[in-house]
Image (cartoon, rainbow, N blue to C red):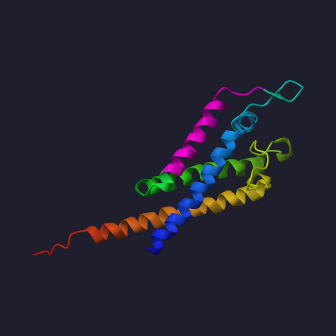
Amino acid sequence: MKKDFGIKVICTLLAFLFAYIAITKLLNYNAFRHTLSVSPVVGSKPVGIINIYKPKAYTAIISITLLIAMSWTVIFLLASKTRLLGLYGSALILFIITMYLAYVICFVTIDDYPFCGVTRPILGIFSMTWKQFLTFNISFLILSIAGILLQTKNKRISQKRELPNVALT
């Protein structure tokens, strides 16, 4: 029962995080899409002398895919039968974002690049520096991995309990 409580806490925290991010990005969709369009990984480079960015066509697809993936992850995390799938989904999303943040910190002039396309929402998550945001992401990635380990361990324990007690002759 205690292990189940720990998994529920982890899944609730992750679900809250992804719901918050998805809702914030949806409410600020144009800023989110613009940030992706000028991203050094996803977007395009400046055209001509003036810093005018010509967005690539697939930034809309990527932004919508991210919002849908986060939304489904929230649903999977909150349903007990799909909890493990939600934990894997959250770990994957957090891993991709963490690698992206590490790339930006290491290889991009951060002063020239906007931060997440959202202006200081309720929790102040987007008022963090790039390095703080990377640390935040790594912390939640570790939390996801811990949830995966706990969930798989609990599944194995419950499967052992369900095995019939057959005597070998």
- Nearer to me, 167 or 80: 80
Q: In which quarter of the image is the C terminus?
A: bottom left
Determine the main secondary structure of the stretch shown in magenta. helix
Q: Where is residue 61 in the image (x, y as percent from the top left)?
A: 61, 32
* Marker count (numbered): 0
State which quadrant residue 67 falls in: top right
Q: Where is residue 38 in the image (x, y as percent from the top left)?
A: 76, 35
**On screen, residue 32 above or below 122:** above
Position in image of residue 63 (x %, y %): 64, 36
Q: In this view, does 129 lie to the left or right of 81?
A: right
Span shown in magenta: 54-75
Place of residue 154 in the rendered image (x, y in percent of width and height, measured from the top left): 41, 68
Q: What is the residue that sits farthest to the right in this orientation?
A: 49
Q: Is 70 placed left or right of 37 in the picture?
A: left
Of residues 31 and 140, which is closer to you in this image?
31
Q: Which residue is drawn at 54% across and 65% down?
A: 9
The answer to if 56 sits in the magenta stretch is yes
- Residue at image position (48%, 51%) is 76
In the rendered image, the quadrant that contains the N terminus is bottom left
Residue 149 as seen in the image, left or right of residue 121: left
Q: Does 49 sit above or below residue 32?
A: above
